[in-house]
Image: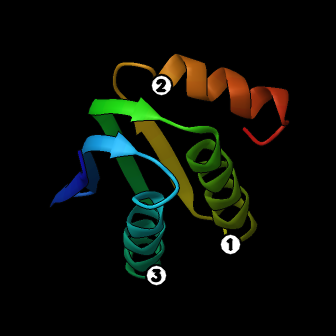
Amino acid sequence: MSLTITNTGNELRLFGNLNQETCKDVKKNVTSYLKKHSSVIINIDEVTSIDRTSLNSLAKLFEKASKTNKKISIQGVGCKEIYDELMNRSIV
């Protein structure tokens, strides 16, 4: 299954699999959004799977955002596991 990204306000909603291939679109969307706004919410309620490469990409997005005084939040089912992983890396 591919990944679909919708934009509602300051929230990017992800639907499908988040993997090495589809994460490129997430990175592009988040980067583009943060050029115009100070914060973005990534909603992962409808993400059916996430691989290690995608997690690493999210970590890099968090690092880049924090260096430019931007804010990324992740909401939805599974966000606790992502938060814990980012905490282990001392990113959030």
In terms of depth relative to the viewer, which is nearer, 38 or 2?
Answer: 2
Q: Is residue 68 above or below residue 81?
A: below
In terms of depth relative to the viewer, which is nearer, 36 or 78?
Answer: 78
- Cα separation, mark 3 vs mark 1, equals 10 Å
Label 3 or label 2, whichever comes before in sequence order: 3
Screen quadrant of the N terminus: top left
Label at residue 68:
1
Residue 40 as seen in the image, left or right of residue 81? left
Closer to the observer: label 3 or label 2?
2
Mark 1: amino acid: Thr
Image x and y of residue 28, in percent: 43, 74
Image x and y of residue 76, in percent: 34, 25
- Cα separation, mark 2 vs mark 1, equals 23 Å
Image x and y of residue 50, in percent: 47, 35
Residue 84 as seen in the image, left or right of residue 76? right
Residue receiving disc 2: 79
Mark 3: amino acid: Lys
Q: Residue drawn 37% across and 70% down?
A: 29
Image x and y of residue 77, in percent: 35, 19
Residue 70 as seen in the image, left or right of residue 36? right
Whether pointer 2 and pointer 1 mark residues with C-beta atoms closer than 8 Å, the reply is no
Label 2 or label 1, whichever comes before in sequence order: 1
Residue receiving disc 3: 35
